[in-house]
Image (spheres, rainbow, N blue to C red):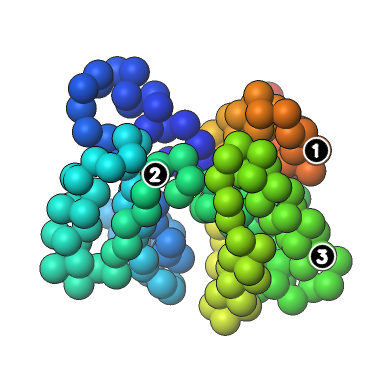
Amino acid sequence: QNGFGAEQDLAALLPGVSILAGLCFISCFQDGPARVRHTGHGRLSLAPLTPGDPQAAAIAAVFAGCGVETETLPAAEAARLRKLVWNIPYNGLSVLADCLTDTLASAPPLLAAVQVIMEEVIEAAAACGVEIPRSFADEMKETIRNMPGSSPSMRLDWLNHRPLETEAIYGRVIAYAAAHGYDMKYARLLQAQLEYQESLYAG
């Protein structure tokens, strides 16, 4: 459930219900039936679809009381766009370059690609009225640099011939940015390449 727009989908199905975005910044993967391996981090971000909804703080307090590092952000849209600064480059490039995150954090050509794509997401967010400081991209890259190499969820799906989240992670935010007058050309290129990769095993 990465990507953009899931909360809006739920709101259409559940009118009048309090809806929160729950975003996990964690490195983990399923390595067998009923078995999840946790390899790093574990922060949870909660953000309401309707700004000002008090449920976010109340639920964050429950998670924090259980020992989970938890923060609240003011709005789901902004929280989703912040996470896409990570998801758009690392998910797509890990598939197209067939590599782990540590390679994306260290190989100069790939690191340069990560930087350009992150900047595009930040610019797209600004066009949509969400300000994300450019230092946020540097923080994300530094976090990955200090983590063990891992496969993002999209690479795991690709390796196991499962459907890729191309529409959720790329298509929806590309369309949202376009509606605000911004063309995410690098994200569009990634989406096209990923859809081709998926077609090689889906057909």
Q: Element under label 3?
A: helix
**Amino acid under disc 3:** Ala
Q: Relative to the observer, which residue lies in front, 130 or 160? A: 130
Label 2, on which residue? 75
Which numbered disc flags the more N-terminal residue, 3 or 1?
3
Q: Please tell me whether mark 1 or mark 2 is closer to you in this view.
A: 2
Q: Position of residue 36 (x, y in %)?
A: 34, 61
The answer to the question of whether label 3 and label 2 lie on touching residues, with beta carbons closer than 8 A, is no
- Left/right placement of residue 53 relative to residue 91 reads left
Q: Determine the CA span between mark 3 and mark 2.
A: 30 Å
Residue furthest out toward the right: 109
- Left/right placement of residue 60 relative to residue 27 reads left
**Amino acid under disc 1:** Lys
Above or below 95: residue 36: below
Which residue is located at x 14 percent, y 59 percent?
62
Which residue is located at x 53 percent, y 52 percent?
82
For residue 197, say whether it is visible: no
The answer to the question of whether label 3 and label 1 lie on touching residues, with beta carbons closer than 8 A, is no
Q: Element under label 2?
A: loop
Q: Element under label 1?
A: helix
- Total residue callouts: 3
Which numbered disc flags the more N-terminal residue, 3 or 2?
2
Above or below 105: residue 189: above
Q: Position of residue 65 (x, y in %)?
A: 13, 68
Q: Relative to the observer, which residue lies in front, 48 or 40? A: 48
